[in-house]
């Protein structure tokens, strides 16, 4: 049976690669996409999403534009990546864009799509949770029609990936962009599966991964993935906060193939106050979330590379 999936992403490289991979999964029926301008820019994010669906999709999917804005902006250098993907020749070869943009803002588009789906919807979020928090605030009824939320975000490690003045470094960026949205979703009845930094630390983008994709570039889809990731520089001598992991792609892969990861249930709270804004913390007083704590690394890379090979 196919899963009905709604995808909200924030237009980073791995968000856009995730969209491409979702479109190749037999077991996934993608019923809607929306873009939030967090770790990317909105205009090229909408445009690149529509072109990826045109080029690599198998039917109509609407793309909606978020009007949500975060409290802690992402670095501009990272956000610029959206423009590089949108400008890739393979996405511009046809010279036209067919996939429609919704007239609704993302959170309303999410509500409408979930309500109109006769089945339950799986939500995939690979950026901040703002649009979901707003959707359930104005339409709490949709929760009953949501199978689960699969989210790339948060960490239970002591050290996250936010290195900013006035922050203690305990948060992950998607949570830090809008800490109140995390708290609102934590307060909901939704079932939550979280791919946290402890999960993605096992899948860094190494030179050997890049070279493997390069060796397979005769496959259009594998070449596309390699071209996308070429927009972020390979840093080999230092592990900095700009080292790239396959954060969102791992999260997306768990939807197509659950066996790639091991999950455990913990209880968690979401912190909104400085200096730990956006921290997700294990606590007996918290709400249950399933977190990925182990990845079959080789199987994961084989799975996504095989999916990319399928693309025509
Ligand atoms: O914190 C991980 C999230 C993921 O959704 N993003 C990137 C992924 O899309 C933020 C981020 C952390 N470090 C980054 C990020 C970096 N070095 N470059 C770009 N984005
Ligand atoms: Ca992202």
Image: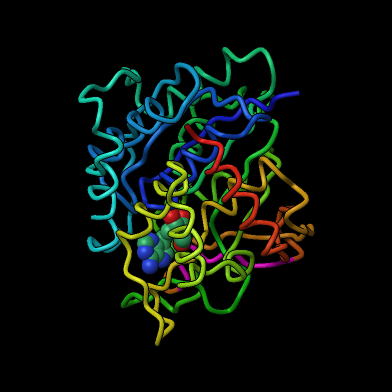
Q: Is residue 216 magenta?
A: no
Residue shown at 45%/20% (left/top)? 61
Asked where in the image residue 27 lies, by quadrant, the reply is top right
Asked where in the image residue 285 lies, by quadrant, the reply is bottom right
Residue shown at 30%/50% (left/top)? 40
Q: Is residue 126 above or below residue 30?
A: below
How did the renderer colour the structure?
Answer: rainbow
Q: Is residue 281 magenta?
A: yes
Q: Is residue 23 above or below residue 273?
A: above
Residue 293 position within the rendered picture, expressed as x and y whole percent measured from the top left: 72, 65
Asked where in the image residue 44 lies, by quadrant, the reply is top left
Whether residue 146 sits left or right of residue 86 in the image: it is right
Residue 154 position within the rendered picture, expressed as x and y whole percent measured from the top left: 55, 61
Q: Is residue 61 above or below residue 126?
A: above
Residue 134 position within the rendered picture, expressed as x and y whole percent measured from the top left: 45, 35
Res 282 visible:
yes
Q: Quadrant of ligand 1?
A: bottom left
Give whichever of 41, 280 is nearer the camera: 41
Residue shown at 24%/33% (left/top)? 92
Residue farthest bottom in this picture: 237
Magenta region: 276-283
Res 176 visible:
no
């Amino acid at each position: 049976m196919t899963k009905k999936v709604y995808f909200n992403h924030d237009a980073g490289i791995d968000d856009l690669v995730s969209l491409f991979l979702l479109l190749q999964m037999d077991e996934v029926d993608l019923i809607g996409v929306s873009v939030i301008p967090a770790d990317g820019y909105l205009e090229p994010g909408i445009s690149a999403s529509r072109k990826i669906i045109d080029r690599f999709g198998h039917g109509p999917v609407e793309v909606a534009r978020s009007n949500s804005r975060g409290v802690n902006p992402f670095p501009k250098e990272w956000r610029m990546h959206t423009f590089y993907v949108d400008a890739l020749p393979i996405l511009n070869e046809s010279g036209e864009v067919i996939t429609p943009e919704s007239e609704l803002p993302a959170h309303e588009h999410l509500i409408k799509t979930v309500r109109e789906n006769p089945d339950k919807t799986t939500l995939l979020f690979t950026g901040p949770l703002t649009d979901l928090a707003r959707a359930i605030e104005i339409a709490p009824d949709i929760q009953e029609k949501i199978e689960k939320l699969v989210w790339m975000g948060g960490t239970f490690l002591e050290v996250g990936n936010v290195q900013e003045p006035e922050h203690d470094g305990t948060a992950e960026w998607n949570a830090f962009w809008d800490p109140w949205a995390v708290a609102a979703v934590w307060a909901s009845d939704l079932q939550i599966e979280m791919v946290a930094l402890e999960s993605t630390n096992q899948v860094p983008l190494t030179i050997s991964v890049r070279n493997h994709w390069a060796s397979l570039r005769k496959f259009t889809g594998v070449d596309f993935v390699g071209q996308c990731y070429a927009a972020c520089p390979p840093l080999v001598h230092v592990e900095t906060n700009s080292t790239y992991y396959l954060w969102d792609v791992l999260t997306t892969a768990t939807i197509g193939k659950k066996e790639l990861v091991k999950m455990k249930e913990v209880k968690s709270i979401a912190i909104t106050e400085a200096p730990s804004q956006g921290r997700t913390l294990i606590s007996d007083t918290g709400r249950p979330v399933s977190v990925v704590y182990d990845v079959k690394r080789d199987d994961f890379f084989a799975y996504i590379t095989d999916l990319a090979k399928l693309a025509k």
